[in-house]
Image (cartoon, rainbow, N blue to C red):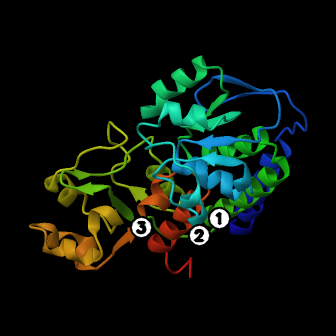
Amino acid sequence: MRRFLNILNLILVFVFIANISFASSFPLTVKDDVGRKVTITKEPKRIISTAPSVTETLFALGLEEKIVGVTTFCNYPEEAKTKEKIGTFQSPNIEKILALKPDLIIATGGVQRQVVEKLEELGIPVFVSYPRTLEEVIKSIYTIGRICGAEKNAKNLAFDLKLRVAKVTTKAAKAKSKPKVFFELWHEPLMSAGPGSFIDDLIKKAGGINIAGSAKSAYPIFSLEQLIKEDPDIIIGAESSMGGNPLEISKRPGWDTLKAVRNQKIYTINDDIVFRSGPRLVLALEIIARYLHPDLFK
């Protein structure tokens, strides 16, 4: 049975790649992650990224020479810090963007919706990368490569990421049980990640049960009473919330009764890796899988 699951996962990877349609010429029209049709008339030479996840994707695709602007939040890889800054993630500077004369802007959804609308009015092609699941992240990465003229690199990267995901899910399927997991986004108020979030998707793929998985929102507020009632086997927290020493949470009033605290099953993960919808989200999956099933992921 396990061998069958392994073969099935690999087959799904190859099917994914086989179903990717390649276009080697421009103009090119694609649909972005929010359903907008975007036409790229010629291969972009000057690209602006308005999100750290997009910047990471462009570098991973080997497109660093084409990047002419990024946000002040774009800090990975190290070379991203040397690129011209176009403002913050929440408020990109339209005038600065125009001054850099881009022929393609890659943005994200949510807080950047109004910025996208303004740039669209100015006649600059804007592609919105706004995936919600790990599969959608990989699809968006491939599409970005395609519209930027890096199809071969995009195919290779998408294949590698899909293969790594398949390896994790195949190993996780061998686990004898699924631990109950609480992911701490923030501690005051206590906030977790529920359905519709990347983290919920990662915990499930890594072979765990997200205790916030049945919440009514993607980022629910938890009470200590709820947490004690659920009594998770494992607690994983964002580094920004837990600080340098995750075991410090045992000093929080009432937390010493939790199974995860008593057994010292408390871990942290870098915020940028787990919150950004870029290639490193697969690394986040691998890290979480190791926390949940150390016997399987040595």
Q: Residue 269 bears which disc, if any?
A: 3
Q: Are marks 2 and 3 in contact (CB under 8 Å)?
A: no
In-front residue for pair 150/226: 150
Label 1: how many Cα within 10 Å (few below 14, some 14–19, many 20+): many
Q: CA distance from mark 1 to mark 2?
A: 7 Å
Disc 1 target residue = 170
Give the residue at mark 2.
Answer: 174
- Asked if residue 277 shows in the view, the reply is no
What secondary structure is marked by label 1? Answer: helix
Residues at marks 1 and 3, CA–CA distance in whole angstroms? 22 Å
Foreground tag (1 vs 3): 3
Q: Residues within 10 Å of mark 3 (few under 14, many from 20)?
A: some
Indicate which label's residue lies in the foreground, 2 or 3: 3
How crowded is the residue under tag 2: few (<14 C-alpha within 10 Å), some, or many (20+)?
Answer: some
Return the residue nearer the eye: 173 or 59: 59
Instruction: Tell me whether the residue at label 1 lies in contact with that at label 2, contact meaning CB atoms closer than 8 angstroms.
Output: yes
Q: Indicate which label's residue lies in the foreground, 1 or 2.
A: 1
For badge 2, the amino acid type reads: Lys
Q: Outermost residue toward the front?
A: 99
Q: Secondary structure at mark 3?
A: strand
Q: CA distance from mark 2 to mark 3?
A: 24 Å
Identify which residue, 18 or 225, lies in the foreground. Answer: 18
- Left or right of residue 27: residue 281: left
Tell me the residue at 31%/51% (across/down). 192
**Left or right of residue 44: residue 204:** left
**From this viewpoint, is residue 183 visible?**
yes
